[in-house]
Amino acid sequence: MKPKSTKQKWNFNPKLRFTYVFLSCCFFFLAGHFASTLISQDFSGAKQKARQLQSLKEEIIDLLPPGKTGDDSITVIPFQVLSWKPRALYFPNFATGEQCQSIINMAKPSLKPSTLALRKGETEENTQGIRTSSGMFISASEDETGVLDAIEEKIARATMLPRAHGEAFNVLRYEIGQKYNSHYDAFNPAEYGPQKSQRVASFLLYLSDVEEGGETMFPFENGMEIDENYDFEKCIGLQVKPRQGDALLFYSLFPNNTIDPTSLHGSCPVIKGEKWVATKWIRDQELDE
């Protein structure tokens, strides 16, 4: 007669087994979700740090004593680098909608067909069609509302180029079909003759949205092949869409004061809507008032 075994057999109830498996799955799911959340927060934090060169914290900053012409506060103006060839920067929400509309209102009564600075051998007749917008010039001192004064002061801080180096605002309107073929803002002495000063940078403040077309374009962005066969009417390369209140800054000169060939730019034809822009050209020398 065999002795009874002392080992006890475990017989799981099927319902209990299902409950055990279900609870185990829930545990591992919640643990995995918690871990993935921590990892994603780490990665998103890393991406955020990569997008910001400096994180501004809400704390008291011990500022240095400024010089006679300096500021006693910190200025923060958000911007995005669009290109290094040419040096082009984008400033979102640089001006308010009210400021933009104010500039449009003051410019409308004085608009005239835009003109060109002519090179040797050029005439108004043989350059027709290159620039078809209408525009006018106005300085901050002529604006009694103070809007242009505030915009000009902000431009000086964004560009770090003194206000005294800036030309008057050139306010432009482009209607359907109007455009400006590719050109340089700097004046090559070989083509235009000796220059007392040179345009270092251009600051474009977009005063209106454009439904379609009207982009500011740089056909040779990043050093594309440049040759004399290029069609200056083409709308190619880096294209910046006009949006009311946004601004674009690009430099026409290298730091050594020579013309950057990739700063060639133009205004694509407006296809739908109307384009308004205020341009501020900034020179390498202080201008006479």
Image: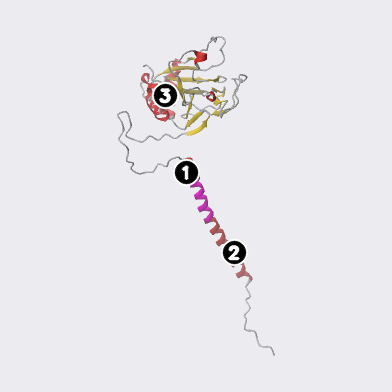
What scheme was used to colour the molecule?
secondary structure
In the rendered structure, the answer to whether residue 44 lies left or right of residue 21 reads left
Q: Which of 112 and 36 is in front in this view?
A: 36
Which residue is at the front of the view, 55 or 106? 55
Q: Which residue is depicted at the point 52% across and 56% down?
A: 35
Residue 114 can be seen, yes or no: no
Q: Where is residue 217 in the image (x, y as percent from the top left)?
A: 55, 26
Task: Indicate the secondary structure of the residue bearing disc 2.
Answer: helix
**Which mark is first along the chain, 1 or 3?**
1
In percent of width and height, residue 17 lies at 61, 69
Please provide percent x and percent y for residue 206.
48, 26
Q: Residue furthest front?
A: 256
Callout 1 secondary element: helix
- Disc 1 residue crowd, few under 14, some 14–19, many 20+, Cα 10 Å: few
Please give the residue where the numbered disc 3 appears in the rendered image: 102
**Of marks 1 and 2, the one in the foreground:** 1
Look at label 2 and name its amino acid.
Phe
Q: Confirm whether residue 137 shows in the render.
A: yes
Q: Distance between the residues labelled 3 and 1?
A: 37 Å
Farthest-out residue, bottom: 1
Front residue of this view, candidates 208 and 234? 234
Q: Which residue corresponds to mark 1?
A: 49
Q: Label 1 amino acid?
A: Lys
Question: Which secondary structure, mark 3?
Answer: helix
Please tell me which of labels 1 and 2 falls first in the chain: 2
- Magenta segment's dominant SS is helix
Kindly report which numbered mark, 3 or 1, lies closer to the viewer in this rendering. Answer: 1
Q: Which stretch appears magenta? A: 35-48
Image quarter where the C terminus lies is top left
Residue that label 2 marks = 22
Q: Earlier in the sequence, mark 2 or mark 3?
A: 2
